[in-house]
Structure formats: structure tokens, C-alpha cells
Image (tube, rainbow, N blue to C red):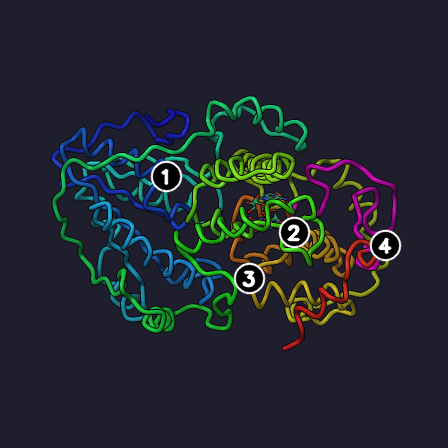
């Protein structure tokens, strides 16, 4: 039984009968064949209606920052899903909009709308930011089949909170109280009615697609080919599980050293949590069992408190892409200091190409561009420093959003806005006053050398 707080419906929906099947429109935020609330809900509904379930996913070419990097992660994850769903006897169909398909789409109905028309019910994933809210609304406008969105991204459902929180310390006790009720393995349901559904498009991808064939599919899409696949992070349920196992064995026992970017102490699971190739429930339960307890407690604080604080912000505040959620005191400080002289002003291109006068910042930017990830400590320094080199907070925010979403595999996420807006004072308190930042917390690139071996870090990300 799925907690009703996870169910987001436009109105009290009954199924549209007769329908051929229940459609689970899987989004690129819950790409897993098990431990998935939306999937379980869709199967339960299909079983009640005596219908088969069809899992459909589509990947277009025109979402913002679409590139080889994001496409490759998604196709690798979809390849795993063909295998995972086949093992469960569930039909999964992945539609890829290649350049040829793109031309045809102008004259053909979208595969999603065509399938939704034939379905008794559409179940999809609820996600509070990026393109997903718009796409959900658009589908609801285009079909009279009821569309129900299910929230699978957080441990405590988004709708369980009736307020926003100004700091980690205010949401922490709420989450910890709710944890015993919510932190359990997510139940799977088994479909009782299995019939093959005819889908109105070719499926060039499958469980057996080779890496070379997958790369050719990516190359055939009209997307940004300059942002290359990550050499360090691969997509899919199996890669996510392997990363979790690696973390439990080697990273978690050293998690208290998380502040040092040269120590492999963190999970590096943020892309998996963003694309949903692993459930946060599974991650936390495995970490709790593996211990040690003090490391698990710290990990829980990041993966539960900080992560769900960011999700709450984005869910409750539609203006999360602006400085509006930043508290008034911090916005005033940044405004009051907006005329302070900057050590340098860099163009967008100089920042993107890691051509500032600071080697440490440049190395962090190169790690983002090359690998699609930045260590958390460096990400804070990276984010804070952009304010030093831009005319004002509004431009700094725009630059950070662009660089983060273009290159980071975990970008375009609620955490992106939690992290970026934190650089401007969100979820924080005033510190001592200094130029440009006023009393907003400042982090010094120079002082980083007193905390960890910055030269070793810089050597890891050489100029190409
Ligand atoms: C400027 C800036 C931008 C950021 N952009 C993103 C982003 O686009 N996507 C993203 O997932 N995180 C973002 N973060 C938060 C954080 O840096 C990453 O979640 C973390 O570094 C991911 O590495 P990890 O998986 O090894 O973390 P771990 O330390 O292993 O933590 C486990 C998980 O907890 C969550 N988490 C950890 N730290 C934070 C945090 N501070 N806030 C919210 N959740 C957290 C993540 O889901 C992470 O995968 C940003 C932070 C800053 C300062």
C-alpha cells in the first residue's frame, strides 16, 4: 500500500474504461525496475483493473543542456531497464528521438500522447523541478485519461511537510521523527495480467546493445556533442549498485574525513539518486546495516537532512531558480556590497574554460567539465568563488546554474538549487562582515591549503 501522501492527482481520478493497459510513464528521475513507488502503484492499479502494465520512457533531443553526457547516462540506464524488466516479465519500451525521428515527429502524434489515449490510467513520477512539472501539465492537457504522479524521490514524502524550513536544524528533527515510519524497503508488486502491448515506434535500444552501438545512437541525436560522456560515472541500476557496494566497503568507514577532496570517502551516488537508478531507501538501509554508526549518522545527515531540505525548498517554492528563496538579510547584504570592487571580472567563457587566475578553482571546474562531478567541499568553494568574479549575485546565480546543469551528471536536481542558493546565504546564518559577501559566509580558496593538500588536488585535474 503506497502512502497517500505520495500520490499527486489533479482531481479524484477514476480509470478511463475501456482501456487496453495501465501506462507507467517513467521519467528520467526514477530509472529503476524495483523499489519504485510509482511502478508498484501502477502495477496495483493494473491488477485491480485486470489489465497489463506497459512501462514507457521517452528521450527527446530538446531538453535544456541535452548532451552526450546526459544522454549516455540515460541510455545506459535504459539498457539495464530492458534487462531488469524482462527478468520481471514487465514490458518496457524506450523511445529515442534521433535526428530522423525528430523530423518525423512534426507530422506524427507524440508516442506518449498516443499511448496515453489507449490507456485506462497513466501513472508517472512526481518531480518538482526542471522540465518535469511542465511535461506533466502538458500531458494532462492533451489527454482525457487520468494522470497520477507518484513521488518516489524522498524518504519522507514531499507532501508530509506543511511548511518550508530555513535551516537544516529545523527540518532535521521532523525527518528523524518520521524516519521509523518511512525508512523500510520499498515493496514491489507483481503484475497478474501479462499481455504484449503494441507500441507505435521502433526501439533501437535493448538489453544486448553494445557500448559502441549505444554511442552511435547518442551520436545520431541532435544534441550538444561537445559535452562528452563521463569517464568516471556510468549509468544504470547495476553501476549504481556497484558504486554503493564500493562505498559501503571503503568510503563509509572513512566518511568523517569527507571534508578532504583527496580522500575517497563519499558515495559518489548523487547522479544515481538524481536519475533514480537506485532508491534512497536502499542506500540508507544498506549504510545503516554496514555502519560504523558514527559514519552512518553523518551520512544520514547529508543524504536525508540536506537532501530533503533541498527537495522541500524546490517543491514549496516555484521561484527556486531565482534568488527569491534566499533570506532577506542575506539578499540585503549582497545588495549593499554589490558595488564593492571585485578582484577580477571573468566572462562566462573564461569561467567555463577554467581560465581564472586561481589554479584550485580551475581544477574544480576541470573536474566538472571532464568527469561531470565535483567533490562536495570543492563544490562549495567553487560556488562561493563565482560571486567574487561576477558583477552581482544575479549573474553569479545564472553562471552557476548553467555550469552545474550543463556539466554535472547530478545537475537539474532539487539539490542543485539547495547547493547553489546556499552559496548566497540560504539555510545559513550571518558570519563576520567582509567585502562583496557582507555577512554572508565566505570561503577562501587560499585558506583551503590549510585544510587539505590543494596541490595534490590540482594535479588530479590537469589542463587538457
Ligand atoms: C554550488 C553547489 C551545487 C550543488 N549542486 C548539486 C547538484 O546539482 N546535485 C546534487 O545532487 N547535489 C548538489 N550539491 C550538493 C552536494 O555537493 C552533492 O550532493 C554531493 O557532493 C554529491 O556527492 P556524493 O554523492 O559523493 O555525496 P555524499 O557525501 O556521499 O552524500 C550522499 C548523498 O547525500 C546528498 N547530499 C550530500 N550533500 C548534500 C548537500 N550539501 N545538499 C543536498 N544533498 C546532499 C546527495 O544526494 C548525495 O549523493 C551542490 C552543492 C553546492 C555547494
Q: Which residue is mark 4?
A: 340
User: Is residue 101 rendered to the left or right of residue 349?
Assistant: left
Residue 67 in the image: state x and y as whole percent: 46, 65
Asked whether 288 or 432 is in front, the reply is 288
Relative vertical location of residue 432 with respect to residue 349 in this rendering, above or below = above
Q: Distance from label 1 to label 2 (Cα)?
A: 27 Å
- Mark 1 near mark 2, Cβ–Cβ under 8 Å? no
SS category of the residue bearing label 4? loop
Q: Distance from label 4 to label 1 (Cα)?
A: 51 Å
Q: Label 4 CB, ligand 1: below 8 Å?
A: no
Q: Which residue is mark 3?
A: 372
Q: Which residue is mark 2?
A: 376
SS category of the residue bearing label 3? loop
Label 1 Cα neighbours within 10 Å, binned few <14 / some 14-19 / many ≥20: many
> Measuring 36% from the left and 59% from the top, which residue is drawn there?
60
Which of pointers 1 and 2 lies earlier in the amino acid sequence?
1
In the image, which residues are magenta?
420-447
**Can the viewer see residue 395?**
no
User: Is residue 320 rendered to the left or right of residue 354?
Assistant: left
Label 2 Cα neighbours within 10 Å, binned few <14 / some 14-19 / many ≥20: some
Asked whether 104 or 180 is in front, the reply is 180
Asked whether 458 or 197 is in front, the reply is 458
Which of pointers 4 and 3 lies earlier in the amino acid sequence?
4
Relative vertical location of residue 69 with respect to residue 194 in this rendering, above or below = below
Q: Which residue is mark 1?
A: 35
Amino acid at each position: 500500500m503506497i502512502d497517500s501522501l505520495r500520490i499527486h492527482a489533479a482531481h479524484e481520478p477514476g480509470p478511463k474504461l475501456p482501456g487496453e493497459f495501465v501506462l507507467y510513464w517513467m521519467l528520467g528521475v526514477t530509472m529503476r525496475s524495483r523499489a519504485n513507488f510509482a511502478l508498484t502503484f501502477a502495477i496495483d492499479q493494473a491488477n485491480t483493473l485486470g489489465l497489463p502494465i506497459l512501462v514507457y520512457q521517452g528521450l527527446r533531443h530538446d531538453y535544456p543542456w541535452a548532451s552526450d553526457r546526459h544522454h549516455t547516462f540515460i541510455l545506459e540506464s535504459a539498457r539495464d531497464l530492458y534487462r531488469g524488466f524482462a527478468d520481471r516479465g514487465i514490458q518496457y519500451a524506450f523511445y529515442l528521438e534521433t535526428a530522423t525521428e525528430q523530423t518525423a515527429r512534426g507530422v506524427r502524434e507524440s508516442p506518449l500522447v498516443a499511448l496515453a489515449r489507449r490507456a485506462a490510467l497513466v501513472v508517472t513520477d512526481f518531480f518538482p523541478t526542471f522540465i518535469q512539472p511542465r511535461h506533466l501539465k502538458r500531458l494532462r492537457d492533451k489527454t482525457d485519461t487520468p494522470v497520477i504522479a507518484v513521488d518516489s524521490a524522498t524518504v519522507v514524502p514531499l507532501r508530509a511537510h506543511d511548511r518550508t524550513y530555513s535551516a537544516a536544524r529545523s527540518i532535521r528533527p521532523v525527518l528523524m521523527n518520521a524516519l521509523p515510519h518511512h525508512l523500510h524497503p520499498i515493496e514491489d508488486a507483481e503484475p497478474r495480467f501479462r499481455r504484449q502491448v503494441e507500441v507505435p515506434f521502433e526501439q533501437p535500444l535493448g538489453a544486448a546493445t553494445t557500448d559502441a552501438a549505444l554511442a552511435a545512437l547518442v551520436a545520431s541525436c541532435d544534441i550538444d556533442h561537445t559535452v562528452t560522456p563521463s569517464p568516471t560515472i556510468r549509468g544504470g541500476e547495476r553501476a549504481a549498485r556497484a558504486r554503493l557496494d564500493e562505498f559501503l566497503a571503503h568510503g563509509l568507514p572513512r566518511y568523517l574525513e569527507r571534508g578532504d577532496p583527496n580522500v575517497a570517502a563519499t558515495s559518489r551516488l548523487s547522479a544515481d539518486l538524481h536519475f533514480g537508478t537506485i532508491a534512497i531507501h536502499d542506500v540508507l538501509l544498506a549504510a545503516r546495516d554496514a555502519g560504523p554508526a558514527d559514519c552512518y549518522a553523518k551520512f544520514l545527515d547529508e543524504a536525508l537532512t540536506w537532501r530533503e531540505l533541498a527537495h522541500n525548498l524546490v517543491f514549496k517554492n516555484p521561484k527556486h531558480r531565482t534568488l527569491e528563496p534566499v533570506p532577506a538579510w542575506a539578499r540585503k547584504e549582497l545588495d549593499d556590497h554589490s558595488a564593492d570592487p571585485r578582484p577580477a571580472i571573468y566572462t562566462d567563457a573564461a569561467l567555463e574554460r577554467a581560465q581564472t587566475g586561481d589554479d584550485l578553482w580551475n581544477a574544480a571546474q576541470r573536474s566538472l567539465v571532464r568527469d561531470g562531478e565535483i567533490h562536495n567541499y570543492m563544490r562549495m568553494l567553487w560556488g562561493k568563488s563565482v560571486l567574487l568574479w561576477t558583477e552581482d549575485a544575479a549573474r553569479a546565480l545564472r553562471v552557476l546554474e548553467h555550469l552545474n546543469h550543463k556539466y554535472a551528471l547530478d545537475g537539474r536536481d532539487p539539490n542543485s538549487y539547495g547547493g547553489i542558493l546556499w552559496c548566497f546565504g540560504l539555510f545559513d546564518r550571518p558570519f563576520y562582515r567582509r567585502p562583496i559577501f557582507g555577512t554572508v559566509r565566505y570561503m577562501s580558496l587560499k585558506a583551503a591549503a590549510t585544510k587539505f593538500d590543494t596541490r595534490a588536488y590540482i594535479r588530479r585535474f590537469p589542463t587538457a
